[in-house]
Amino acid sequence: MLAKDCKKKIILTGDRPTGKLHLGHYVGSLQRRVALQNSGEYDEIYILIADDQALTDNWDNPQKIRDNMIEVALDYLSVGIDPARCHICVQSNIPALHALTFYYMNLVTTQRLSRNPTVKAEMAMRGFSNSESNDNQAGLPAGFFTYPVSQAADITAFKATTVPVGEDQEPMIEQTREIVRKFNSTYKNDILVEPEILLPELQSQRRLPGTDGKAKMSKSLGNCIYLSDDEKTVKQKVMGMYTDPLHVNVSDPGHVEGNMVFTYLDAFCRTEHFERFLPEYENLDALKDHYRAGGLGDVKCKKFLIKVLEDMLAPIRAERAKWAADLPAVYRILKEGTEAAVQTTNRTLAEVTAAMKVNYFADETIIDEWDRWIRQ
Ligand code: TRP
């Protein structure tokens, strides 16, 4: 067998703890993580709570990140991330990640970083400007600008082969792959591993719009359904969803494209939900056909969507309540996950510092080397 074939399969993925996780996170990535965890195909799985990355645009509000650390941890555990099979770890407490970030900074140019489309979009949203002359806008924090380098450190420190994330993370994985190639060629080694991205399987899972129909479910737009929302809140949010503004009377023909109720049904409903909750329709296509033809009201569709979502959210909520009642256990999970991550990443850092010849104190052979050098 080739050495390459025996390579371990390692997953690294993560989230910024800036808020509770929502349905967009669930369809876009959490669900997949649980499936990958349960597949038994991976040798190691690390899930990183990226608090340092969150600080790059929340440096003035560390309490927000500290509070959301526990929310995100509870969200993970409640959807079925199993701490016996995944290490849940905290970025700020894994020192090797900082060291690697600093070394990787030498391997990227600011021009290359400026081309990252995800960072560009985030800069626009936050009013960060990179121009020297624009004084209406906030300057661009160097930490924020360079977070893709820190993300490359996250991924490579674990030697991740697979990074399951949403499509907005594609530029980060590409940047990581470039850094890996540059590192390995510059320091003549094959220490770092080029990761593969694993995108959600279905288009409907890739970018869930907000309940208001805006492009993305996002906390700042106030259009999210959170995994931790109670039943009443979920009902209210679904009842207030953006549908088809031209579908005024039940008898009017309706549009399913751009109609959030159908967009969410595309993402969440399965044929068995019809048998259980809406047996007069065989499947989603039949429901859509009726809506398009006219004669099907929004309320009926919304009530069905509520049942579909509740079917998924009720067990998640129950699981969350169990963990929330035992925070010391959650604390231990994070602590142990982080300790495992520290060990793994320190091993990578040791290889990197050796390749970069800055591992002076790894052993004393350097004394002989210096001796030869000064006598030559
Ligand atoms: N950038 C990711 C996000 O905004 C979070 C993240 C940080 C991450 N480090 C990572 C994702 C490493 C995957 C791998 O959601």
Image: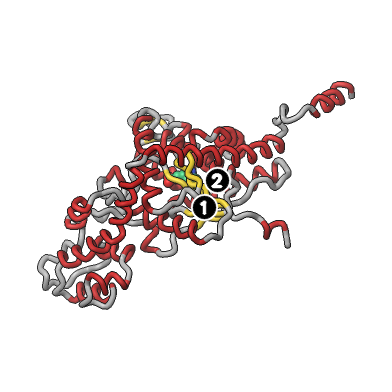
Q: Amino acid at mark 1?
A: Val
Q: Classify 10 Å Cα crowding around label 2: few (below 14), some (14-19), many (20 and above).
A: many
Image spot of residue 5 (x, y percent): 67, 60
Q: Quadrant of the N terminus?
A: bottom right
Q: Quadrant of the C terminus?
A: top right
Residue that badge 2 annotates = 155
Using the rendered view, name the quadrant where residue 294 is placed. Answer: bottom left
- Give the residue displayed 38% in from the left and 35% down from the top: 65
Q: Residue furthest right?
A: 376
Using the rendered view, name the quadrant where residue 299 is placed. Answer: bottom left
Q: Nearer the viewer, residue 330 or 310?
A: 330
User: As displayed, is residue 136 above or below residue 238?
Assistant: above
Q: Is residue 344 left or right of residue 73?
A: right
Q: Nearer the viewer, residue 226 or 248?
A: 226
SS class, disc 1? strand
Image spot of residue 204 (x, y percent): 36, 63
- Can you tell me whether the CB of the residue at mark 2 lies under 8 Å from the nearest atom of ligand 1? yes
Residue that badge 1 annotates = 163
User: As displayed, is residue 98 above or below residue 271?
Assistant: above
SS class, disc 2? helix
- Can you tell me whether the CB of the residue at mark 1 lies under 8 Å from the nearest atom of ligand 1? yes
Q: Nearer the viewer, residue 281 or 111?
A: 281
Q: Count the marks: how many?
A: 2
Q: Is residue 231 left or right of residue 17?
A: left
Image spot of residue 309 (x, y percent): 27, 60
Image spot of residue 138 (x, y percent): 36, 31
- Give the residue displayed 26% in from the left and 65% down from the top: 262
Cβ–Cβ below 8 Å for labels 1 and 2? yes
- Give the residue displayed 67% in from the left and 36% down from the top: 350
Q: Is residue 172 visible?
A: no
